[in-house]
Image (cartoon, rainbow, N blue to C red):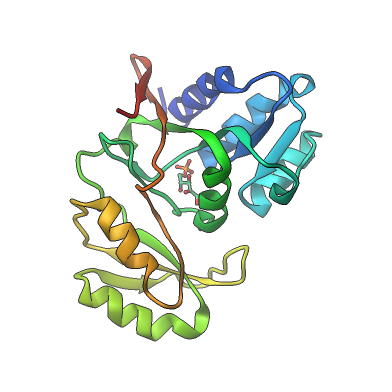
Amino acid sequence: MTQDELKQAAAHAALAFVPDGSIVGVGTGSTANHFIDGLAQMKGRIRGAVASSEASAQRLAAHGIPLFDLNEVTTLPVYVDGADEIDPTLAMIKGGGGALTREKIVAAVAERFVCICDASKRVDCLGRFPLPIEVIPMARAQITRALQALGGQAVLREGFTTDNGNIIIDVHGLRIARPVELESTLDQLVGVVTNGLFARRGADTLLLAAASGVERFDAG
Ligand code: 5RP
């Protein structure tokens, strides 16, 4: 199977977690796109979706799936999204597609976070994938210095603006042994909007697709 076929298998397995009549939180990226396409096949059974990016909102709308503003809903039974890396505790690095802020906001409202990945995303220790940080543009230089001081190599994502009008700095070379602590440390840097560690609120369930099938892991 190709990596894309594995992403599709994980995404389709997540459809079983969508309750009838619900509003679904929807992530961003190529794996989430497969989930959106699957959701379209059962759109008569759901009320609609809250999107974590303009790109996902457009894809949902193209399928005729009603879109809800997050401020219109008080809770979401499930949020389904991919990840760039996920560790054994189901802490993740996200934001490879630059949608980390809205992803973290929608995930925070959801009762259950279902992460959908191909097997290449599973790691023992987070950090091989550069950690994305969304930053207010005027804080770029000071945040770059602060990130270098933490031991990472901070690289501006050239030519990229987030849906919120900000920049992304990708931090290379981190070995993230304590993701919960690092997530909190990064959140305290003035000028950081969101960091791509999803550890304090990690996934509740991982659906991991390999050639042998889709395996389910639940947070302990
Ligand atoms: C976007 C994300 C994505 O979930 C992450 O980048 C994984 O993407 P893909 O499913 O395309 O491999 O965090 O901001």
Give the residue displayed 38% in from the left and 45% down from the top. Answer: 84
Q: Residue furthest top?
A: 212
Using residue 169 as the reference point, say whether residue 120 is left or right of it.
Answer: left
Q: Residue furthest front?
A: 74
Using residue 4 as the reference point, say whether residue 67 is left or right of it.
Answer: right
Q: Is residue 28 visible?
A: no
Expressed as whole percent of the image width and height from the top left, the position of residue 188 reads: 37, 70
Give the residue displayed 52% in from the left and 46% down from the top. Answer: 108
Q: Is residue 201 visible?
A: yes
Query: Which corner quadrant of the image does residue 99 belong to?
Result: bottom right
Vertical arrangement, residue 18 with respect to residue 88, above or below: above
Vertical arrangement, residue 199 with respect to residue 147, above or below: above
Give the residue displayed 40% in from the left and 56% down from the top. Answer: 196
Q: Quadrant of the N terminus?
A: top left
The residue nearer to you, when weighing 170 against 146, is 146
Q: Quadrant of the C terminus?
A: top left
Counting labels gives 0
Give the residue displayed 25% in from the left and 34% down from the top. Answer: 88
Using residue 8 as the reference point, say whether residue 140 is left or right of it.
Answer: left
Vertical arrangement, residue 138 with respect to residue 89, above or below: below
The residue nearer to you, when weighing 34 against 1, is 34
Expressed as whole percent of the image width and height from the top left, the position of residue 212 reads: 33, 14
Expressed as whole percent of the image width and height from the top left, the position of residue 32 reads: 55, 37
